[in-house]
Amino acid sequence: MDDPRFNNIFNEDFDGNYDDVMNRIVDQINYPSCGVSGASVDGAGDDSNENDSDDSNDDDDDDVDDDDDADIDGDSDDDDAFIIRRHFDRKKLNLCTAGAINAYYINYMYKEPCMVSYNTGMRWLTEVLRGHWKRSVNMFRMDATTLLSLCTNLETHHGLKPSRRMSVIEKVAIFLFTIAVGASNRQVQERFQHSGETVSRCFKEVLKSLRLFAVEIIKPVDPQFTSTPREIAMNPRFMPHFKNCVGAIDGTHVRACVPAANQIPFIGRKGVPTQNVMAACSFDMQFMFVWAGWEGSAHDTRIFLEAIDNSTINFPKPPEGKYYLVDVGYPNEYGYLGPYKGERYHFQEFRRRGQPSGRKEVFNRAHSSLRNVIERSFGVWKQRWRILQNMPAYPYKTQVEIVVASMALHNYIRRRSQDDAVFSEYDRNPNLIPDDFLPDTVQASVVQGSQRPSRMDFVHDGIANSLMEQ
């Protein structure tokens, strides 16, 4: 197929156009029958002319004989010409067929190698993992030891398997690189030297494995909430006042990429399409529950009530006498302790306007200082995984699964990496609350339901009085 003489003939005749080649083949296949009929017509025409000549020369017998001999010679010459032309057409048909096959191969079968860099994905990955620890953290948001442990866990317990040409660690690295730096499929192709189809397939395989992993790791470490959290027990600001507190609940928004025709339900107070995510966390910044996928316009209260009332959601409800901390937007339900309404609450308000006055503001400041763990957890989580700031155009179900998988990875890093730089920064600064990547463009509304008396009112007052006596 690379013969220059053939290419010259082929390109000259058909200009490398596959459709022209196929049309010419069809013509060549049909030509012999047309050629035969054409030859017969030509012969018949010659006989007619000769018969006319015979009619005009009936008296000359010698001329008739000469004409008969000429007819025989003419028929012989026509047969020879037809045979030669038929032989020529057969060769031409072979040439056209070969050209068509070549064109089909070039256009539809032959693939010029693209990812041929010496620095393959596995070679680069090995270099990163064996190099300075910061390189692994920068690329995958976890150190090499944690990454290798994660790969072993996913392969052993959650169904992630190597393929013929790719190991589990490279598959996990592709997934982590994608969500850590927000890389596109083309960027991952170039970095790991694999085709776009291979990158997409590996991403889906790891995501499927992480879905199973999330069920195991996003749950309370102590499901019965029998002991007081260490962060409360070791801090005299909160102990014994909040000794029965088990965690904090809040909602957050993550960018969503949905078709323009379907965007209206996803546009809420952020002004852009988002998904609303409800989460509960412990006081060491681990997520105990997550419910992602709600439209951005859905109110936090609606999601909260659905979570605690729907038995199929498996929300870890607090046992009798225990409670979660919630903000002012949540209803006054037993087991969920909010602040006093109509009083200063956030840390910034006390910084600007001085110390709290009265037992309600004293309670609100302590409540805010303890409940901000959920906001800090969201901050660490979003700071680590850049894909959450600008979600690519995956199917919406995949976007929801990415949110849950990234929270599972957040918990795993917290448990396995004691020296993680991001967690360490927040541990050193208990009042560090990062700014939201998606600031509100519309003030969040507070559902004004009927403030019926609740047993939580007694919990409010008891803790407030205890704080005033301190």
Image (cartoon, rainbow, N blue to C red):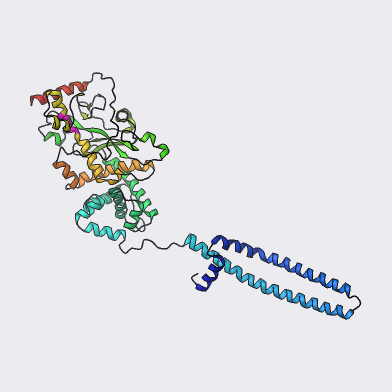
Q: In which quarter of the image is the C terminus?
A: top left
Left or right: 4, with 69 as reference point: left
Q: Indicate the position of residue 141 as horizontal and vertical percent values.
A: 24, 49
Type of secondary structure dominating the magenta stretch:
helix
Counting every numbered tag in the picture gives: 0
Q: Give the range drawn in magenta.
A: 365-371
297 or 233, which is in the foreground? 297
326 or 170, which is in the foreground? 326
Left or right: 161, with 134 as reference point: right
247 or 221, which is in the foreground? 247
- Can residue 242 be spotted in the picture? no
Q: Indicate the position of residue 95 as horizontal and vertical percent values.
A: 57, 69
Q: In which quarter of the image is residue 186?
A: bottom left
Q: Quadrant of residue 315?
A: top left
Q: Is residue 322 above or below residue 131?
A: above
**Residue found 15% across the figure and 29% down from its top:** 365
- Can residue 272 be spotted in the picture? yes
